[in-house]
Amino acid sequence: MQALRDRAHGHEGWGRWNRRGGGVLLVLPFALVACGGGSGSSAGDTAKKGDSQAVGSANTELGGKSAAAADKNAKPLDYTPPSDSQIPGGLLGEAIRRGEALLNHTTDSLPEYATSSLQCSSCHINAGRTRDAAGLLGVYARFPKYMDRTGAVIPVEDRVNYCFTRSLAGNKIPNDSREMRDIVAYLAFISTGVPTGSHVMGEGMPQMPKLVGDSARGRQIFATTCAMCHGADGQGNPPAFPALWGPKSYSIGASMAREERAASFIRHFMPQNNRGSLTDQQAFDVSAYINSHPRPDSPEKEKDWPAEGVPYDVPYDTRGHKAYRPPAKLLPRRNPAGAIVPPPPPVKRTTRVAAASTTAEKK
Ligand code: HEC
Ligand code: HEC
């Protein structure tokens, strides 16, 4: 509980920075890194403790306690990712362009993997360049990172595959595929110049105030404000208009299935033709309504947050957490094996002892 409150505070802080915009660019070489996971993502808001643990040890090597103490006041960088016109020539440029196209046209390009109505850019607006819309600007500098939903340090490829399997309710793509490399080339491109380990304004989504949605009110808002694009039945009109629930929507294991996370996206970016027109409460109401409907299951979700840090609004049971407002029904996945990204193997004590001993012994 204490941990939850601490995180919430941290996030109000990030939210303020996010909105302030245009601040002085403050470069604190290693002070920025321990600020945890940006603005309250599934990765972000839960990673606070783990992140600072992981980074804390690095800080000790780099600068000791003073560096760690400066973290609290460190400011994310005011960063604008390069535009398409700045994509370099040659084969690297081609890879970046293909990666960007994969984010924008995921279902067309990868029909076997992206099986829902969603593109990456349905949530990562403008292929992740738009601030606060699950912003991916600077993302390459944030990996590898400790993600406490997984309980392990993961590479960016695994994070991409969490979105394929959970947010797109599709199948993981091979880490060594050309497509994955193209996506990563694009993610690195929109992180050009961001120092490793630093955070930028507009990454992720701003934290919302703690409200509780009323799905009856949300139903009204949906009918008058959302149905014209997403359909009265919430099934959208793909590929232009993605579904909000049902078999072609995001899975229960997606951040968007959490009431507060979806409320943040909706508050700032929906309705698409009149952004910012809903109040915080209305965003929660319609989020509660959308997320009360059936949606695809996410196999092995009960293994999430193996250690600690589970956010209050996770809609399924995990270790030490009771589902918050779970959807009416979970729809089985056609290819459950494809929907699971195995976590990196745990470190065993014996391995560490072996590593500390001489190489001769090991060999
Ligand atoms: C249903 C919405 C949705 C879709 C679709 C989606 N994502 Fe995400 N993605 C999110 C959210 C929400 C986060 C967490 C953002 C945050 O707050 O840091 C996220 C996080 C990420 C991150 C890590 C960001 C970070 O800073 O740690 C990457 C990389 C990513 N997504 C890539 C992709 C790719 C590539 C696709 C398409 C294959 C995709 N996403 C599809 C919602 C989505
Ligand atoms: C004018 C058409 C339009 C209206 C109205 C609209 N949306 Fe959207 N919505 C979109 C489009 C298009 C996207 C894909 C992202 C983008 O291009 O902005 C989207 C994406 C989304 C997403 C993330 C992707 C997904 O399918 O889960 C959510 C959630 C969402 N809208 C909820 C809402 C809610 C709630 C409302 C009503 C308050 C609403 N939208 C009104 C067009 C619309």
Image (cartoon, rainbow, N blue to C red):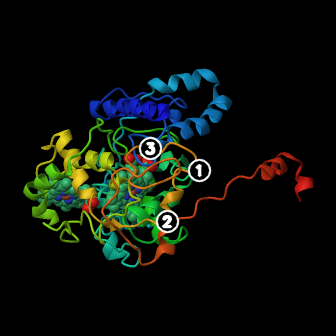
Question: On screen, 241 above or below 153?
Answer: below
Residue 292: image quadrant is bottom left
Q: How far is the residue under mark 1 from the one under mark 3? A: 13 Å
Measuring from the top left, give residue 72's x and y in whole percent. Answer: 47, 25
Left of 303 or right of it: where is 212?
left
Mark 3: amino acid: Gly
| Residue at disc 3, secondary structure | helix
Left of 329 or right of it: where is 10?
right
Measuring from the top left, give residue 171's x and y in whole percent. Answer: 44, 72
Q: Residue at x 88, y 52 (%)?
A: 359
Q: Cβ of disc 3 within 8 Å of ligand 1?
A: yes
**Residue placed under numbered mark 2 in the picture:** 181
Mark 1: few, some, or many residues within 10 Å (few <14, many ≥20)?
Answer: some
Q: Residue at x 17, y 64 (%)?
A: 230
**Quadrant assignment for the C terminus:** bottom right
**Residue placed under numbered mark 1 in the picture:** 153
Which numbered disc, 2 or 1, marks the residue closer to the eye? 1
